[in-house]
Amino acid sequence: MNVTVGWWAALIGLALAIVLILRKLNTTYALLLGAIVGCLIGGANLSQTVDIVVKGSQSVIGTVVRVLAAGVLAGVMMESGAADRIAKTIVSKFGESLAIFSLAFATMIICAVGVFIPVAVLIVAPIAIEVGTRLKISKIALLIALSGGGKAGNIISPNPNTIAVASGFKVQPSLVMIGSIIPALCGLGMAVLLATLVQHRGAEVTLADLGPASVGPRRKDKDLPSIGRSLVAPITAVVLLLINPLGSLMHIGILEKFQVDAMYILPLASIIGLFAMRQGSHILDYTKAGLGRMVDVVLILIGAGALGGLITTSDLPKQIVAIITKAGISGSFLAPIAGILMGAAAASTSTAVILGSSSFGNSILAFGTSPVAAAITMQAGATAIDGLPHGNYFHVTAKAVNMTLGERMKAVPYEALVGLTMTIVASAIYLVF
């Protein structure tokens, strides 16, 4: 397949996908249609277009397999009540004097243990509304705390975005998770600071806002597993994921040889945690629920792979590299810049890193950036402006605290500041110093 699609056609295909998403077309179909139209108007014939779309979709299959494995952990943590227990314990331990910090930290931890960021916000939102009502905290402050904490947790978790960016640069997800800890903590700090500054601005939250905020019927406290049992699955997953990186860091041969993929580790840790919570009889129900939550993600990743195939086949990456070079910007910053641009275009962290790594990966590495640094900074960049109205996250989180779309838009700049903080810190650590 010897065809190069014009950069302008790739941009038209990307723009078409965004417009179709805004027009409420299914995201996967919008991405596929954008890819097809971009190929055809860019000079590819019908057969070449099929090859580009198929090749692009095939490039994400490794990510898809690992994401499906992560679905087991997500299903166990959500359906067993473990995620709910962790959130409640964190908030209760810190108390109302540190309410905003505790809410942001709880959402961060729920994300970090493998729960998707929109679901993490939905889990913590009812607790946030109850606390916010007592302390007269504004809706926008609560959302900034929840969303900012979620963003911080999302870059250190075995979630689809981490798996996708690690696969894109052919590094272990655990290396991306470890390397993102400091940027994540800085993002958490910024979220708490911003939420504290605006806690009395805008409409105050009330108990009337509780309605649709939860992810399902909420269990009574006595029906939830203990905090110790709830932590077994995520701790097991983290320990197993860290064995090889720590072995490499400490030059311990036996640990370096432990090269077990997340595809095995995440389901295994989930099953161990499930039996620790004495809910082994629910294994089929919980794994089915986890898989169900992954279906939309997998389909979107396939669509993103197709669109990534269009961009990779075009000369758009070369044009962007040329613009960066002429502007006098160091090429090492291409990774976070690509993450920011793709995050805004796709309004999805996972889709952004798929597009960014597949489209700009070779150019980024050609500047001498290490694969780990590229993965960490691109993922951080993708969190900057990924919560725009053409993505599901914007609308899910608006419903979580019963916000109007106008109120929700006011939170976007604050969320962007959290994402940019993590991007700047990650870039400073891995690209400057």
Image (cartoon, rainbow, N blue to C red):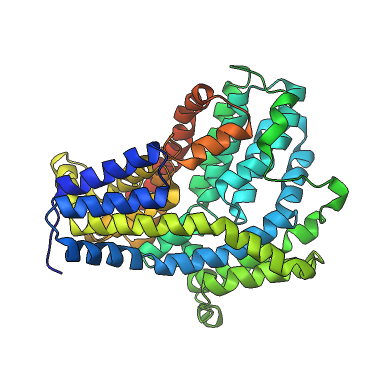
Using the rendered view, name the quadrant where residue 63 is placed. bottom left
Residue visible at 24% across and 56% down in the picture: 310
Tell me the residue at 74%/55% (across/down): 82
| Location of residue 405 in the rendering, given as x and y in whole percent from the top left corner | 51, 26
Camera-side residue of 379 and 309:
309
Q: Let me know if residue 142 appears in the view.
A: yes
Is 315 displayed left or right of 51 in the figure?
left
**Residue 248 location (% of width, % of height):** 48, 73
User: Viewed as shown, does residue 120 lie left or right of 12?
Assistant: right
Q: Which one is in front, 258 or 4?
A: 4
- Above or below 408: residue 343: below
247 with respect to 31 (left or right): right
- Give the vertical position of 243 relative to 293 (above or below): below
| Vertical comparison of 354 with 237: above or below | above
Asked whether residue 318 is in view, the answer is: no
In which quadrant of the rendered image does the N terminus lie? Answer: bottom left
Seen from the viewer's position, the closer of residues 169 and 24 is: 24
How many numbered callouts? Answer: 0
Image coordinates of residue 271 in percent, x first then y, are: 69, 70
Q: Nearer the viewer, residue 257 or 31?
A: 31
Quarter residue 18 falls in: top left
Quarter location, residue 19: top left
Picture coordinates of residue 152, whole percent (x, y): 54, 45
The residue at the point 16 percent across, 42 percent down is 323
Q: Is residue 142 left or right of residue 324?
A: right
